[in-house]
Structures are given as C-alpha cells and as structure tokens.
Image (cartoon, grey):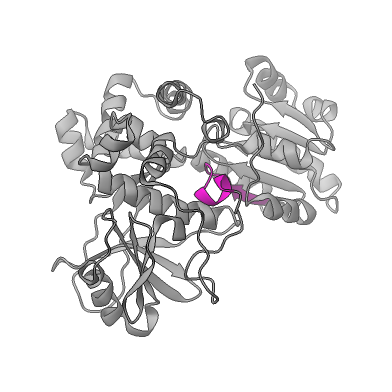
C-alpha cells in the first residue's frame, strides 16, 4: 500500500554524499523509511535489489562478481547485512572506477555488524548516514527548523498541538507508515513490529533461545526508561544471567531500538554518577511496551514523565542525526543529588535541558540547570526547561521555559 511521502531532513545530506562518495550506507531501524527515501531521491536513475529474500541472498553470496555484473551501478542494495560477503566485491568494482560517485547505495538495519564490516572494507570510499523515525519537525513539514539554542533571532515554534493530540502523537510514534496513515491501528502495528523485529533481527544477531524472556526484558527496560539503569537488578528480577542482559541491551542498541545515554563527566572536583540511563528511540514503541493505548492514561499515569522526556530527547537526536551529525548528548547528575535531564554539546557549549511534564513552568524547575551553569562556568550555555504547556517565558537570566513544540 503506498502512502504519502513525507520529506526528510536527511535529503540534502544524502544528495551531497552521493556527489562526493562512490558508496553511501544508510542505516537505521526497520521501517524508518530508508528504502522509501533512497528510491525517492535516486530511484529513477538507479536499479534496486533487496538482499532479504533467501534466493537473492544465495545468488549474491554464491557468485558475487556475477551478481554485481547483473546489477550495475548506480544501484540500491537493500538490507545489505544479509549478504556482507558482497562488500569486498563492491570495493573491487568501486576501485575500478574510483572517480565515479554515487555508484552504490546500501541500506541496513543493524548498526554494529554493518558499521564494522563497511568501515573495514570500504574505508575512504563510503559515507555512513543514519535515518531514524520521523522527527516532529519532519512530520509537521518543517524539517529544517533549527534547535532553540542554534538560532539567534526570535524563536520559531512548530504549531502547538492540543494536549490530547500531542499525547496521541507520542502513542503513535514516528514510524512513517503510522504518521502518513493516521487511521492505522497503532496497537496492531506496534505489536506486529515488535514481533517481526524480534523474530528477524534478534535471532539473527544473537541466539536468543527464549523469546518470552526477551519480551520481559524489553518491558523491564520500558518501565525503567529515563532512570539510572542497573542491569544486574534487571537480570536478577528476570532470572537471567548478567551477561545475557548485557548482550540483549547491545542488540537493542545495534538495531536502533534503544539509546543508552551516558553521564557527562567534567573534572570539576564533584563526585558524579557513572551509571547510564536507557531510552527507547520511539515513543510509540515505549508506550506499546508499557501497555498504554490511550492518551489520557499515558499523560496522567506513572510513565508520563518518562514518555515526555523520551519525546524531547529523541526530537533532539533525530534533528541532529538527520543533518548527518553525530549527536553528543548526555545527562548530568552529582552524588549530592543535583541533576540535569539532558546536556547537549553544541558549538563548543554545553546546553542544559530539564524536562517537566507540568504545563505551568516555575523558577524552581530550573534549580538543576542553575547549579550546572555555576559548576561549568564558561562551558555552560543557555538552559531550557521544556514543559507540557504552551507558554514560552524566561525563568532566570540564562534559562528559558519552552513548550515541547519549541524544541
């Protein structure tokens, strides 16, 4: 079923990469729109082959040179993680026509394996880019809108959504199919995504013997979103080995399902917490795993703050990743209990961001940011309290309260 195409912020970056490199690799979670995007930009001039069907994969592995002969460049090879054996032969073809750019477009939904193989084999010949699910900017048709700390003029905002609508968006998440077809059954889509993703990706990456335990592990992570993640506690609660929990977490990170946020360390003589936090890449996935189906329950329930914090974090990450940048995002927490939810490194400054579910921003919400700015001095930039309402107002000399639409 074809659905409307939603313009992606990564388009100019991809075009530029295709002009400068013989090969472009686009990674990202399944269903984030990689194939659609490549076909939209290069489909008219390029061939297209998916390496997922077993017969195609078998022919690529059995006779790589013959396979590449049959599919001359420019060509899009989809899901290349199924036939990594092809990569050395792609390199051979590129080296025969080194000056020709935009020859091979490769997609993959498994980052660790693919990145290692690609960088080893195609070093210097390939641009590596990532496509995550849609950001709010892309969904609203304002893909190029800067982040609040990047613009010097008056701050623009995306259209502010009504409270219920915003939470409906969080439940839906950012996968293009769901955004382009608002009438789709959200619950059914996420259940089937979860299932397919488990069956295909997890089993191919690690021999997960017990999928039921893995499902419980996913739900345990969802319940701990935005909190300090103690994996040995999770493993003990689920009755699995700590090494298994670590392996499963790395699978989820490699397939772009979760983000492990690490604490920011600066040598400021304070004892800082070293444990990471975990977030899901998609608020829809998170709400599905938490069993939430209704905007009111999601907003008012015990997971409300964690879902809202996830939405803010992933909006920042998607905005940066879809420009072809490598985001530097952390959290900050001292052993004395001062903390800032998110710290974004931008243009040599550290931008502190506190996320509050309340629709009524108050100066006390900025306490953590003030301590951070005092401790880090010149390094700290303007701070922001992102809240659940629709007002924008100063809370302190270098701290502004902004609505979610202003991020």
Q: Nearer the viewer, residue 159 or 135?
A: 159
In the rendering, at what x and y percent does residue 326 appear?
Answer: 52, 58
Q: Magenta residues?
A: 127-140
Q: Is residue 302 left or right of residue 81?
A: left
Q: Residue at x 62, y 38 (%)?
A: 34
When asked about the image quadrant of residue 404, the answer is bottom left
In the rendering, at what x and y percent does residue 117 appear?
Answer: 59, 42
In the rendering, at what x and y percent does residue 289 appear?
Answer: 32, 31
In the rendering, at what x and y percent does residue 29 appear?
Answer: 51, 37
Q: Is residue 131 magenta?
A: yes
Q: Is residue 51 left or right of residue 318?
A: right
Q: Which residue is situated farthest in the top direction here?
A: 55
Looking at the rendered structure, the number of numbered marks drawn on it comes to: 0
Q: Which residue is situated farthest in the bottom direction here?
A: 378
Q: Residue at x 60, y 53 (%)?
A: 143
From where the camera sits, is residue 39 visible? yes
Q: Nearer the viewer, residue 114 or 11?
A: 11
- 220 shown above or below 159: above
Q: Residue at x 37, y 84 (%)?
A: 378
């Amino acid at each position: 079923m074809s659905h409307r195409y939603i313009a992606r912020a990564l388009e100019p970056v991809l075009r530029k990469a295709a002009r400068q490199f013989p090969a472009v690799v686009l990674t990202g979670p399944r269903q984030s729109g990689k194939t659609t995007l490549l076909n939209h930009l290069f489909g008219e001039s390029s061939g297209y082959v998916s390496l997922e069907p077993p017969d195609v994969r078998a022919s690529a592995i059995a006779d790589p040179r013959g396979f590449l002969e049959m599919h001359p460049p420019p060509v899009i090879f989809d899901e290349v993680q199924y036939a990594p054996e092809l990569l050395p032969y792609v390199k051979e073809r590129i080296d025969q026509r080194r000056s020709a750019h935009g020859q091979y477009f490769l997609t993959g939904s498994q980052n660790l394996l693919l990145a290692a193989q690609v960088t080893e084999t195609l070093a210097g010949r390939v641009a590596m880019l990532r496509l995550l699910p849609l950001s709010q900017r892309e969904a609203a048709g304002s893909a190029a809108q800067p982040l609040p700390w990047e613009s010097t003029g008056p701050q623009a905002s995306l259209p502010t959504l009504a409270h219920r609508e915003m939470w409906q968006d969080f439940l839906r998440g950012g996968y293009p199919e769901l955004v382009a077809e608002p009438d789709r059954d959200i619950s059914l889509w996420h259940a089937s995504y979860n299932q397919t993703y488990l069956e295909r990706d997890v089993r191919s990456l690690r021999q997960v013997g017990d999928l039921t335990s893995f499902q419980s592990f996913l739900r345990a992570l969802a319940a701990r979103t935005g909190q300090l993640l103690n994996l040995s506690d999770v493993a003990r609660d689920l009755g699995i080995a700590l090494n298994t929990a670590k392996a499963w977490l790395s699978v989820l990170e490699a397939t772009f399902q979760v983000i492990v946020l690490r604490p920011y360390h600066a040598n400021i003589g304070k004892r800082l917490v070293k444990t990471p936090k975990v977030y899901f890449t998609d608020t829809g996935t998170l709400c599905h795993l938490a069993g939430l189906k209704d905007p009111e329950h999601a907003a008012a329930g015990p997971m409300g703050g964690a879902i809202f914090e996830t939405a803010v974090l992933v909006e920042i990450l998607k905005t940066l990743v879809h420009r072809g940048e490598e985001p530097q995002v952390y959290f900050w927490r001292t052993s004395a209990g001062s903390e800032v939810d998110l710290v974004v490194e931008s243009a040599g400054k550290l931008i502190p961001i506190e996320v509050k579910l309340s629709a009524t921003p108050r100066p006390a919400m900025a306490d953590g940011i003030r301590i951070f700015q005092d401790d880090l001095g010149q390094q700290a930039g303007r701070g922001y309290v992102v809240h659940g309402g629709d007002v924008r107002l100063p809370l302190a000399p270098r701290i502004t309260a902004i609505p979610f639409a202003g991020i």
